[in-house]
Amino acid sequence: MRIDIITVFPEMFEGPFSHSIVKRAIAKQLAEIHLHNLRDFTSDKHKKVDDYAFSGGAGMVMMIEPIAKAIDFLKSQRDYDEIIYTSPDGELLDQPMANSMSMLENIIILCGHYKGIDERIREHYITKEISIGNYVLTGGELAAAVIADSLIRLIPGVLGNETSALSDSYQNGLVSPPVYTRPREFNGWMVPGILLSGNDRLIAEWKHQQSLKRTQERRPERYNDLVDED
């Protein structure tokens, strides 16, 4: 998978992509991440990429020309499966979306900023708009890093244990059950005996029931959707 990120602040990605699973995926050549500074595509001598909105109003708007130039440049190099814009009013990122998108080969992520981007970019270039939550960030860089991480970890060979991602929260629509490790007893707090029984069938049933319980308690809207499907 190749991810090209168009951003005003490429330095913000140095931390998220230089450690842990994403770093290993890049080292294994299972994923590529390329950062493109939007200011490199502006014709303004001061490297300006934003301007006032027509009709007035507070806040600046990212200009159409540098964004169009950046996307056109990338599209001249290869075909892209999705051109994503990070926006608080986009489709909410969830695990099924990440699962589906992890099978794509080439993706562009445009990081939003200021009051947003010229609407013509959304109309003529963007193929998918994604939000990571119902709140507003200073810019789309953190959202782009979240999106990239959620996709890359699902690529076969990235995680040490190929089944690890399959047991993550939301893979089956449920929140993950509680997990425990050594020691069996700490401060009088015991690991549930069922997990030490060695009975795979009973352990699986216990985990499923715990997932149902946690989903009902912590994500009632998701639990209700699952009940309605049944």
Image (tube, helix red, strand yellow):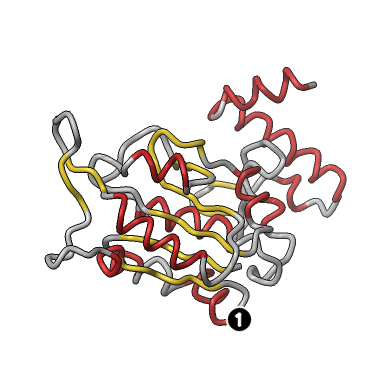
- Considering the numbered disc 1 on the image, is that residue within a helix, a strand or a loop? loop
At x 58%, y 72%, the residue is: 31
Q: Is residue 116 above or below residue 6?
A: above
Can you see residue 143? Answer: yes
Quadrant housing the C terminus: top right
Q: Position of residue 167 (x, y in %)?
A: 70, 51
Quadrant housing the N terminus: bottom right
At x 66%, y 64%, the residue is: 155
Q: Amino acid at mark 1?
A: Lys
At x 72%, y 20%, the residue is: 227
Residue holding disc 1: 28
Q: Residues within 10 Å of mark 1 (few under 14, many from 20)?
A: few
At x 80%, y 38%, the residue is: 205
Q: Position of residue 57 (x, y in %)?
A: 15, 30
Q: Is residue 209 above or below residue 49?
A: above
Image side of residue 38 versus residue 73, left or right? left
Between residues 107 and 78, which one lies in front from this camera angle? 78
Between residues 28 and 107, which one lies in front from this camera angle? 107
Q: Position of residue 92 (x, y in %)?
A: 50, 37
Image side of residue 18 versus residue 77, left or right? left
Image side of residue 38 versus residue 177, left or right? left
Q: Position of residue 208 (x, y in %)?
A: 74, 37
Can you see residue 177? Answer: no
Q: Is residue 179 above or below residue 33?
A: above
